[in-house]
């Protein structure tokens, strides 16, 4: 979420669906790093395959947005398409 706010602060429009993707990804920040972040069980007991599929789709959406903006600024991407 903070990166999205920084981008908006720099004058770049962030579409609502990208803002939603950033919000969903932000929910994974602490539980993904600390196995005891969830009271009463591990993160593994709280996540399902659909959660990971959504997170991957959200991350791809964010990367596509960044790549497009970077290209518009004349940057070069070494990432495979």
Image: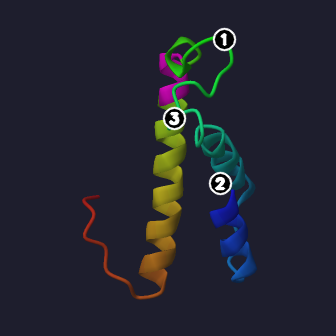
Q: Is residue 71 magenta?
A: no
Q: Residue at x 28, y 63 (%)?
A: 79
Circle 2 residue: 18
Res. 60 mark = none
| Magenta-colored span | 48-52
Q: Can you say whether 5 is above or below 32 in the image?
A: below
In terms of sequence position, does the residue under pointer 3 or pointer 2 come before the other? 2
Circle 3 residue: 32
Q: Can you say whether 48 is above or below 31 in the image?
A: above
**Circle 1: element type:** loop
Q: Residue at x 52, y 16 (%)?
A: 48
Circle 1 residue: 40
**Circle 3: element type:** loop
In terms of sequence position, does the residue under pointer 1 or pointer 3 come before the other? 3
Asked whether the viewer can see residue 13, the reply is no
Q: Which image quarter holds the N terminus? A: bottom right
């Amino acid at each position: 979420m903070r990166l999205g706010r920084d981008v908006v602060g720099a004058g770049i429009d962030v579409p609502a669906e990208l803002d939603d993707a950033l919000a969903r990804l932000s929910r994974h920040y602490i539980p993904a790093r600390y196995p005891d972040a969830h009271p009463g069980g591990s993160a593994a007991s709280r996540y399902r395959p659909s959660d990971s599929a959504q997170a991957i789709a959200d991350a791809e959406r964010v990367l596509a947005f960044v790549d497009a903006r970077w290209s518009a600024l004349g940057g070069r991407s070494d990432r495979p398409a």
